[in-house]
Amino acid sequence: MRRSPRGVRGRQAGMTLVEVTVASVIFAMIMLAVVTAMRTFGQSYDRLQQATALTSQKREVDRFLRQTLRDALPESGYFDGAAGWLEWVAPIDRVGSAGGLQHLKLESRGKDLMLHFAPFDRFGDPQDEPDWGAQVQSVALHSGLERFRVAYRLRPDLGWVNTPESQGDGTPEGVLPWAVQLRIAAIGQEWPPIVVAFERYGTRQ
């Protein structure tokens, strides 16, 4: 009688130690590649979320500044500024307990672009210092600020200057110039210049 080949088949059906080791190494490499890909995806997703949030924040700041500057009160004594700050009066939607006409001041403070609020008094002296923070606390519009500069164009036929000084034609200081330009750089990015022209520039009231 021929001997049963079961022992031979049993040995052929199993895996040798070398085969198990090779399979384990291949499996480990596959798992490492999957983990690395997932980690890279997660990091890319986080960066995308941060970039999206920054873009959205920048868009909101741009929109708010353009709107409030366009609505600036065109009366003498309610507009002032220099190369590093800007102050004006404009109506705003309710912020905290304040709404309507507000004194607004935009400036850099450390690494933050700050916006300050003060209640507007129609019967007050425009030369008096506004009561900043009396109703609404200052707001950091953007962090990571690297540069903030303001320039003023007093008339359409003049160039940009660093202060909204008297136009030399009898127009007093404190009135709206023809246009204002804001240049902002933050978190390694230079924003497109925010340029707002005033329809009622140089108004004497």
Image (cartoon, rainbow, N blue to C red):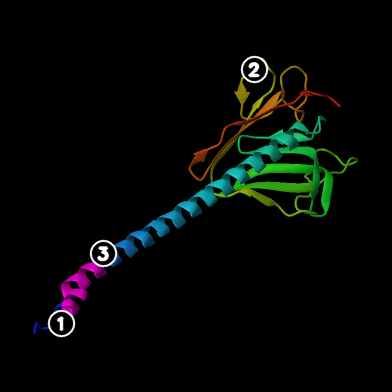
Q: Amino acid at mark 3?
A: Ile
Q: Amino acid at mark 2?
A: Leu
151 to the left or right of 32: right
Is the C terminus in the top left, top right, bottom left or bottom right quadrant? top right
Is the N terminus in the top left, top right, bottom left or bottom right quadrant? bottom left
Q: Is residue 42 magenta?
A: no
| Marks 3/1: CA–CA distance | 29 Å
Q: Which residue is mark 3?
A: 26
* Residue 10 higher or lower than 164, as above or below: below
| Marks 1/2: CA–CA distance | 102 Å
What residue occupies the far right of the structure in this picture?
Answer: 123
Closer to the chain start, of discs 3 and 1, is 1
| Marks 3/2: CA–CA distance | 73 Å
Location of residue 199 by image quarter: top right
Q: Which residue is mark 2?
A: 158
Q: In the image, what residue occupies the spot 71% across and 43% down? A: 105
Q: Is residue 16 magenta?
A: yes
Q: In the image, what residue occupies the spot 68% across and 17% down? A: 156
**Front-most of residues 151 and 145:** 145
- Closer to the observer: label 1 or label 2? 1
Residue 7's mark? 1
Q: Main secondary structure of the magenta part?
A: helix
- Closer to the observer: label 3 or label 2? 3
